[in-house]
Amino acid sequence: MVDSKVVLETIEPVGQRVLVRHDDERRTTKGGIHLPDKAVIPVISVRIVALSKQIENDPDYAIQKYDKVLIDPPNGIPVDFERDNRLYIIPIDDIVAVIRKEDRQD
């Protein structure tokens, strides 16, 4: 029997930062307008993959792991961890909104 050890790498942001993963980018608006490949989308939606301990333990931040958020991306640091390289470390201040779904009965 071969004793093999599996080593998993994880990324834990530090300080006032979070790790996010880009959602699939839409190149067509809801109205059906096709955006050119070079079009700059100033705010994008991402999923939070990991929070720094500082953010996680601070009740002033109303975000959690797996939340969908909108970010202003210029300060994102790409993380070379996946082949498609869709992971980024961003400062918490670059999160501009949290997208929440609400069940409503009218």
Image (spheres, rainbow, N blue to C red):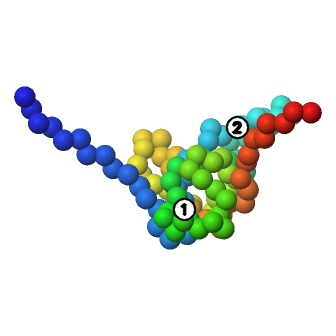
- Please state which of residues 27 and 64 is positioned toward the viewer in this rendering: 64
Which numbered mark, 1 or 2, is in the foreground of this view?
1
Label 1 with label 2: CB-CB less than 8 Å: no
Q: Is residue 69 left or right of residue 31?
A: left
Residue at x 48%, y 64% (from the top left corner): 53
Q: Secondary structure at mark 2?
A: loop
Q: Label 2 belongs to which residue?
A: 26
Q: Residues within 10 Å of mark 2 (few under 14, many from 20)?
A: few
The answer to which image quadrant residue 90 occupies is bottom right
Pinpoint residue 89: horizontal percent, then vertical percent.
Answer: 52, 59
**x then y, percent, for residue 87:** 50, 50
Q: Would you name the residue on which mark 1 appears?
A: 56
SS of the residue under disc 1 = helix
Q: Nearer the viewer, residue 105 or 9?
A: 105
Residue 40 appearing in the image: no
Work out which quarter of the rendered image holds the N terminus and state it.
Answer: top left
Q: Residues within 10 Å of mark 1 (few under 14, many from 20)?
A: some
Identity, as a three-letter code, of the amino acid under mark 1: Glu
